[in-house]
Amino acid sequence: MPQYVPFLSKLRPHRWLASAVIVGCAVLMTPQAAFAQARLVLNNDPWLVIDNGAWLVVGNPAPNAITVTGGTGRIVSEDEFDRIRWNIGTAAAGNVYTIPFASATGTSIPLTCGITADGTGPASASITFSTYNHTVSAATWDNFVYRPSDVTHMNNFDTGVVPTPGATNESRHVVDRFWMIDPGVAATATAPYAYTTKPALSLGFRYSPTEDIQSLNLLTPPDVAAAVPLGAQRFNTNANIWGDYAPGQGAWAPGSVVGVVVTPANFFRSWTLSDIANPLPIELAHFDAECSGTYVTVRWTTASERDNDHFTVERSTDGVTFQALGQVDGAGNSHGLIEYSFIDHAPVGTAFYRLRQTDTSGDHDYSLLRVAGCDEGDGTTIVNAWHDGHDLNILVNAGGEQVHSVRLFGASGKEIWNNAAVALPDGLSTVRIPVTGIATGIHVVRFDGPRGPMTRRIPIL
C-alpha cells in the first residue's frame, strides 16, 4: 500500500517552487523526504501547484501512477512551461492516463490521454502535459496575445499562414485555454525523452464554461442552453496552420470534448477547443486548379453547406493582390457532396487561385490558395514570405518533390545564410530561416532548383 503523507493529504494549496519536482520510483513526497512507492496518490482533496517552470516527472508508466482518492485532487499548471512529464514509454497501448488538472481557482478540468497505438523510441520516451488559460495575460478573449510559443497565429480555419490575404484573428470563437501535449520534448544524450514515432491517442478535454470563456467571446457563456458546440484543434507547426485538422473532432457537451482521435501524423503539441460551426459555413472536401489545354479549370467539392449564398473565384499573380473572375451560386444548405467548377478562359501564366465564400448574411471567408498555369513550368513558386520576429518564413508551393539550394542575402547584397539541400515536398510547405539579430532592411531569399531560380524580397523592420 502507498504511504500517505500528511503534507499531501491534508494541506492545500502548496506551491512547488523548485526548478524540478522529480516523481520517479519515489512519488509520495513531503518537502523533507520521499518514499519509494511508484504512485503519486492525491488523497483527501489536496492541491499540487507547479510553478516557476518546474517539472513534475512521473517515471512509472502505469496509468495509476497518478491516483486521486477521497476527493477531487488538483494539479495546477496554468503555464505553458509548468509541466508534467510522464514516462509512458512504448508499451502502453490500451492504457488511459488521467491528469487531474485544475484551474487556478480550483475548478477540476481533468485531461485524459488514451494510448490507442504505441509509438517507438527509447524506454524513457515521455509525453509532457501542461495547460493554462487567459489569466496569464491582461487579454481575455484574445488568444493570440497569450498563445503557446510554437503557435504563430489564431487565424481562421482555412486561410493558412500569416499573413495570407483574408486571414483574421478568430480568437472570439475559441475557448480561452490551451493544452500542451508534447511527445517530442527536447532530449539530451543522457535523457532521451522524445518519441521516434509518435503514438496514436484518444484525448478527452475538460474546461470551465465560466472561467475559460470570457466576455467578448462569441461562445455564449455561461448559458448552457445556448452554448456553442466545440471541437478540438491542434496547431500544425510544419504547415503553420490550424485548419488541416477539422474542429469537429470529438464529442462535445458543455464543459468537455471527449473521444478526440489523434493519429501519429496529427499529433502536434498545442491544442485548444473551437466553435465547430465558425471556420467556414461550408465544409470544403476538395479544391484544386489545373491547366486544361489553354485555360485553367477550378474545381471544388463541398461535403456540407450552411446558409451558403455564393462563391467568388479570385486570381492573383503575386499571392497578395486578388481580382474576382466570376461568381458561382451556392446550394444554401446541404449535407451531401456537391461538385462545382469554374473556367478561367484567359489565364496569365502561373497564378494563385482562391475561393471567397459568402453566406446569406453577407459574411465571407477564404479558402487556401491553389497554384496553376498553362506555361511550361512545373508550378513551383514562392507564395509568401514574412519575418515573425525570430525567423524568416517562406511559404513555397512545389510541383512535386524536389531539392533546392536556398540562400539569403542581406540589405547590402552580401550572402548571410545558405543551405545547399532544402527538401521541398509536393504542395505547400514552409521553409524557416533563423535570423535572430539580423539587421533591418530589405533582404532577398533565392531558391535554385530544377526549374531555375526563384527570388523574393522580404522587408525586416
Image (cartoon, rainbow, N blue to C red):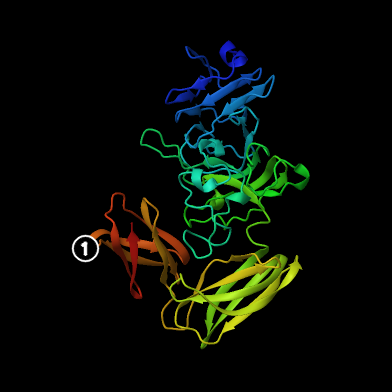
Q: Is residue 387 visible?
A: yes
How far across and down, in percent of the image, does residue 29 sit? Answer: 52, 16
Residue 96 is at least partly visible in this image: no
Left or right of 434: which side holds 218? right
Query: From what the image shows, is residue 331 above or below residue 459?
Result: below
Residue at 73% across, 46% down: 227
216, 40: nearer the viewer: 216
Residue marked by disc 1: 412
Q: What residue type is labelled 1?
A: Ser
Left or right: where 6 falls relative to 459: right
Q: Position of residue 366 (x, y in %)?
A: 58, 66
Count of picture labels? 1
- Secondary structure beneath dot 1 equals loop
Quadrant location, the C terminus: bottom left
Towards the viewer: 413 or 34? 413
Give left or right: position of 56 versus 334: left
Label 1 crowd bin: few (<14), some (14–19), many (20+), radius 10 Å: few
Q: Residue at x 64, y 64 (%)?
A: 363
**Quadrant of the rendering where the N terminus is positioned:** top right
Picture coordinates of residue 114, whole percent (x, y): 63, 39
Which image quadrant for residue 388? bottom left
Q: Is residue 268 depicted above or below 336 in this figure?
A: above
Question: Residue 292: image x %, image y %?
Answer: 54, 84
Vertical placement of residue 425 versus 183, above or below: below
Q: Which of 261 and 457 is in front in this view?
A: 457
Q: Please name the residue shown 47% across and 80% down the image.
A: 373
